Amino acid sequence: MDFRELIIKRRSIREFDGKAVSPALVGEIIADCIQAPNARNAQPWSFIVVANSGMIKKLSDESKKNILWDMGDNPSSPYTMYKPILENVDFNVFYNAPCVVYIAGPRDVRSLAVDCALAAAYFMLSAADRGLGTCWVELGSVIRDAGLRNELGLSKDYAIASTIALGYPARIPGTPPRSEPRILKIIE
Amino acid sequence: MDFRELIIKRRSIREFDGKAVSPALVGEIIADCIQAPNARNAQPWSFIVVANSGMIKKLSDESKKNILWDMGDNPSSPYTMYKPILENVDFNVFYNAPCVVYIAGPRDVRSLAVDCALAAAYFMLSAADRGLGTCWVELGSVIRDAGLRNELGLSKDYAIASTIALGYPARIPGTPPRSEPRILKIIE
């Protein structure tokens, strides 16, 4: 797909049809996404692919629990607006996507968040190019339980940097409004 | 350009021919890049376009000076390997690119670095799609001088999140090696 067509077509998808995503296809998307630029070509990213609905539910529950715990009674938490859905036991933060991909890497890499965000941008575009839908789900990123981390292959020195729900879109929503770009200064 | 062709063609460019980039073209690239996904569609990004070689030299000198100052005698600084080039007065961190674009936003936006990295990924792909070359230049991002910040339109509460050199490539280098993707776990 032409790049300009693709960036319009890629939307955050929060409704998926039931169709599974094959691990081979996820592998192709990952192969695209590691072409992203990154600091010193250190490629600090690793990937975890979860395509099991029971495990996805566990990860959703774990992350919701931890975010609610962190929030406590702090009214200035950035997550306050999400409290009702986080407290709803039936709400799956991954919107019942058939697949969740974590991009993770060593905590001590200073550029980890940015490198993985660049890879995530490529991931989301590559998925859209293949007719798949994605949504970056920050609410699903707080995994602390030692047993669960072990099941994910996440050692203590690794941090989750990007969390992406992946599946076939039930529908592709319209483009949400964008503000006019704020140009602070043009110096010619 | 087809997305898969584009991600191979987009390389970090460190040699530019002398040709200027028109502000209108930079505006088109920015218009593409604000289509990037971002937390809660808050679009915290702003843009500064610098196409004046004297100003670009000043920004290079200011950033080099600050990074050297921060480094001090700390042998574990992540910038130690760059000390010789930072101390070279003739070295321009922007590789003599005719244009530099800063993506900046409010320091207190928790997702600023990641939102702007997603926009930067789009920026670099959009530029490559138009035959331009880019390089994320972290070494050019440390601008503290009040007068210079003022000239850039950067208020105290704004932080530079992404720094991109932009111009027409003198040549497009080959694809640097990528490691095989590290898949920590596939859970089916």
Image (cartoon, coloured by chain):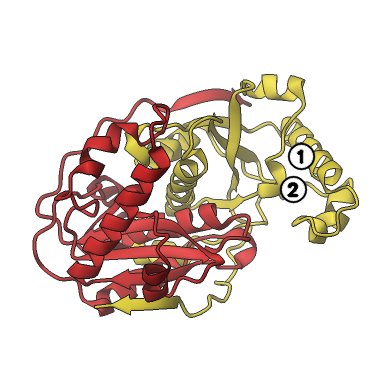
Chain colours: A red, B yellow
Which kind of residue does numbered mark 1 sit on?
Answer: Ser
The quarter holding residue B160 reads top right
Position above or below: A31 against B88: below
Circle number at residue B161: none
Is label 2 on the same chain as label 1? yes
Residue toward you, B184 or B137: B184
CA neighbours of label 2 inside 10 A, class few (<14), some (14 to 19), many (20+):
many
Residue B135 vs A130, above or below: the answer is above
Q: Is mark 2 on a helix, strand or loop?
A: loop
> Residue B93, labelled with which disc?
2
Q: Are marks 2 and 1 in contact (CB under 8 Å)?
A: yes
Q: Which of B150 and A15 is in front in this view?
A: A15
How many circles with numbers are drawn on the protein?
2
Taking A159 as reference, is B77 left or right?
Answer: right
Q: A117 or A87, which is in the foreground?
A: A87
Residue with the mark numbered 1: B63
